[in-house]
Image (cartoon, rainbow, N blue to C red):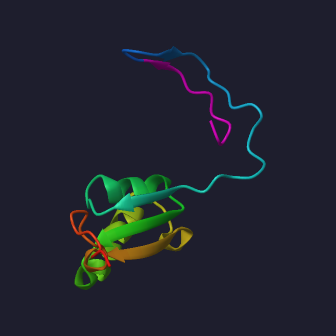
Amino acid sequence: MLRGERPSLDGKWYTVTDAINEPPPIRRVPVMIGGSGERKTFRMVAQYADSANIICPVDQISHKLDVIAGHCETHGRDRSSWSSAASPISAWRPLTTRPARA
């Protein structure tokens, strides 16, 4: 709908026919997909995303970029048409860790 499509859906809970987005966006809305899944997530990055947030250990970043490049080749997309940011797992604090109180 953001690019002028008029999708229809006949789902379990909702049904819509030829949905429209009015008013349309002023400019194209960029899409970012984040994750580490090499089969589904990275395939969707190659097909739809303008940018990717790759979550993995630092030593796997180049491998993950190669996997996405492979998906881009499969789907006929130029690898340089999207950007990436790496979020190494080692940079994330576990959710169970709480700061010490003063």
- Left or right of 21 on screen, residue 99: left
Q: Residue at x 26, y 61 (%)?
A: 38
Which residue is drawn at the image coordinates 28% and 63% (left, top)?
36
The question of residue 9 being in magenta is answered with yes
In this orientation, which residue lies closer to the viewer: 65 or 23? 23
Residue 43: give x, y in percent of width and height: 35, 56
100 lies above or below 35: below
Vertical position of residue 99 compared to residue 76: above or below: below
Which quadrant of the rendered structure holds the C terminus? bottom left
Q: Residue furthest bottom?
A: 59
Helix, strand or loop: magenta stretch: loop
> Looking at the figure, which quarter contains the N terminus?
top right
Q: Quadrant of residue 30?
A: bottom right
Residue under the point 27% across and 83% down: 58
The image shows residue 73 at horizontal and vertical percentages of 40, 65
Q: Is residue 46 left or right of residue 27?
A: left
Residue 6 painted magenta: yes
Q: State how many labels appear.
A: 0
Q: Position of residue 23 (x, y in %)?
A: 77, 34
Hey, which residue is sitting farthest left in the picture? 96
The foreground one among 24 and 40 is 24
For residue 87, side relative to residue 59 (left or right): right
**Bounds of the magenta span?**
1-10
Picture coordinates of residue 93, whole percent (x, y): 28, 73
